[in-house]
């Protein structure tokens, strides 16, 4: 009996050893297979490279073939954020992160997996226009901003050439150019609104921060872009406003398309004294990181904080909003954010470089918001246009009515605005007075070299933020 039990144990032990030995062998065989497959494809690519160069009807340079092949590698990933960067692209990217570059002043995005989304679900406006270029947000004070382009618009053509089949590189190349040169783009807004805009290119300087006070008790801070200077600028502003007697703060990251990860981590740390701010996860262990808050804070945790977000809040802005929401440090008001939850690395390579998605970021609660966005605690949207309103809006855009009025009446008062609105109604414009007044005010701010930091009268989300803080006794 004991002999049988011993034999069973021996057989079981051998069985376990064989199993684990097999487990150890499989990865080796898989790795070897993968390496062999890679070498085969590299060899085939090299053959094609030489064959085209030697046999194509026209002479073609090695550089042209190389750049075409490299761009194809990144395009095969079907990731709009992973791209090959030419030498000029690298220079442009550096200009953007340090605070200035040439162009029209737009942050844009382009989906690549739209076909699957449309086939598997109902076709929303965004899905229907996914082949085109989406405006994440305009940069305040730039030509595109002053031209009235808004977050959520789609650029469907540049100089009458459809953007549907353009890569992001091609779109950027067409939008950027020498200062004082012009470019015509066609905008699709809402299902039935289409209009053309001619924009004069300029040197784009990216502002970082705008500040103000509301009723001398609420500090208002709008973060426009996450640059190396954002955290330092915000800390200075917050300290000054706090010392002036502000008892609460509103941080506005609406229409902020993001920026540097280090910038948003340092900024979030100003308001948090412990815990995770954001974490990144990758299939490469070295890319997995947790960014945590230090004990030092600029504003005590008992000072109420409201964060404003909208569909133009992306990337770093969503990291900030997610950290403030998940930790309970702030109350979020506005619309669901854009939904960019991936992290890219920029690497120099040859004369150019590349940008590659290497990980995804997660909020303190372990949520990745890629293609989902951060939801506000309280949703506040501007009024939706009815079908009649959309027809009226198309007429206003076609006639350029509001920009012309503001251009002719830059200091228009209540009487001039009321008479203008009455004339619009006589012409068949059905949009209600309050919305027209907001549109006029927005246009006046766009053309102002020193616009106000906020507009409490027509900014519904901001008004809700103030009412929320006043309800807390501020």
Image (tube, grey):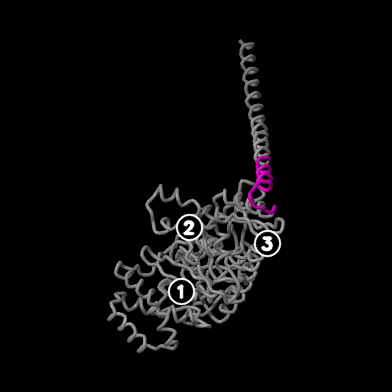
Vertical order, 322 against 196 (above or below): above
Residue 379 or residue 302, whichever sits in front: 379
Q: Which residue is mark 3?
A: 87
CB atoms of marks 2 and 3 within 8 Å: no
Q: How many angstroms separate mark 3 from mark 1 (CA)?
A: 32 Å
**Could you say where residue 406 lies in the image, as x and y percent from the top left?**
42, 84
Q: Is residue 413 left or right of residue 321?
A: left
Q: How many angstroms separate mark 2 from mark 3 (CA)?
A: 25 Å
Residue at coordinates 44% horizontally, 50% vertically from top-left? 117
Image quadrant where residue 181 sits: bottom right
Label 3 secondary element:
helix
Magenta residue check for 61: yes
Label 1: few (<14), some or many (≥20) within 10 Å?
some
Please provide the residue range marked out in magenta: 43-62
Magenta residue check for 287: no
Q: Which residue is mark 2?
A: 164
Residue at coordinates 39% horizontally, 59% vertically from top-left? 125
Per the picture, the main secondary structure of the magenta-coloured stretch is helix
Label 1 secondary element:
loop
Q: Which residue is mark 1?
A: 148
Image quadrant where residue 266 sits: bottom right
Task: Let me know if residue 365 appears in the view.
Answer: yes
């Amino acid at each position: 009996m004991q002999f049988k039990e011993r034999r069973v144990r021996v057989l079981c032990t051998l069985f376990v050893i064989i199993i684990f030995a097999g487990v150890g062998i499989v990865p080796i065989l898989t790795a070897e297979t993968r390496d062999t497959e890679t070498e085969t494809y590299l060899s085939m690519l090299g053959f094609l490279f030489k064959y085209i160069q030697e046999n194509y009807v026209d002479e073609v340079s090695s550089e042209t073939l190389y750049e075409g092949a490299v761009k194809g590698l990144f395009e095969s990933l079907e990731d709009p954020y992973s791209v090959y960067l030419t030498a000029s692209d690298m220079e442009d990217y550096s200009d953007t992160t340090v605070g200035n570059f040439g162009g029209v002043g737009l942050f844009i995005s382009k989906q690549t997996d739209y076909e699957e989304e449309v086939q598997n679900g109902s076709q929303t406006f965004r899905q229907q226009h996914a082949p085109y270029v989406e405006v994440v947000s305009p940069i305040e004070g730039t030509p595109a901003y002053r031209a009235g382009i808004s977050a959520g618009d789609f650029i469907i053509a540049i100089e009458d050439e459809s953007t549907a089949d353009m890569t992001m590189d091609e779109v950027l190349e067409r939008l950027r150019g020498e200062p004082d040169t012009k470019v015509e783009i066609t905008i699709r807004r809402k299902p039935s609104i289409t209009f053309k805009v001619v924009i004069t290119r300029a040197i784009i300087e990216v502002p970082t921060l705008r500040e103000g006070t509301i009723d001398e008790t609420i500090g208002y801070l709008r973060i426009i872009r996450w640059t190396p200077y954002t955290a330092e600028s915000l800390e200075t502003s917050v300290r000054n406003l706090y010392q002036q007697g502000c008892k609460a703060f509103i941080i506005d990251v609406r229409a902020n398309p993001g920026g540097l990860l280090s910038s948003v981590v340092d900024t979030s740390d100003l308001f948090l004294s412990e815990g995770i701010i954001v974490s990144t996860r990758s299939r490469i262990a070295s890319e997995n990181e947790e960014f945590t808050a230090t004990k030092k804070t600029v504003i005590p945790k008992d000072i109420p904080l409201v964060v404003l977000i909208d569909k133009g809040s992306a990337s770093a802005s969503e990291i900030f909003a997610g950290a403030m929401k998940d930790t309970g440090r702030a109350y979020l008001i506005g619309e669901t954010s854009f939904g960019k939850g991936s992290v890219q690395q920029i690497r120099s390579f040859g004369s150019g470089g590349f940008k590659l998605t290497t990980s995804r970021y997660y909020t303190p609660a372990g949520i990745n918001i890629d293609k989902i966005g951060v939801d506000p605690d309280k949703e506040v949207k501007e009024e939706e246009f009815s079908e009649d309103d959309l027809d009226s809006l198309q007429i206003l855009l076609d006639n350029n009515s509001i920009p012309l009025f503001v251009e002719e009446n830059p200091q228009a008062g209540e009487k001039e605005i009321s008479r203008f609105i009455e004339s619009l109604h006589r012409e068949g414009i059905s949009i209600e007075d309050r919305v027209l007044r907001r549109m006029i005010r927005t246009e006046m701010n766009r053309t102002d070299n020193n616009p106000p930091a906020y507009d409490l009268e027509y900014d519904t989300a901001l008004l809700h933020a103030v009412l929320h803080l006043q309800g807390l006794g501020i």
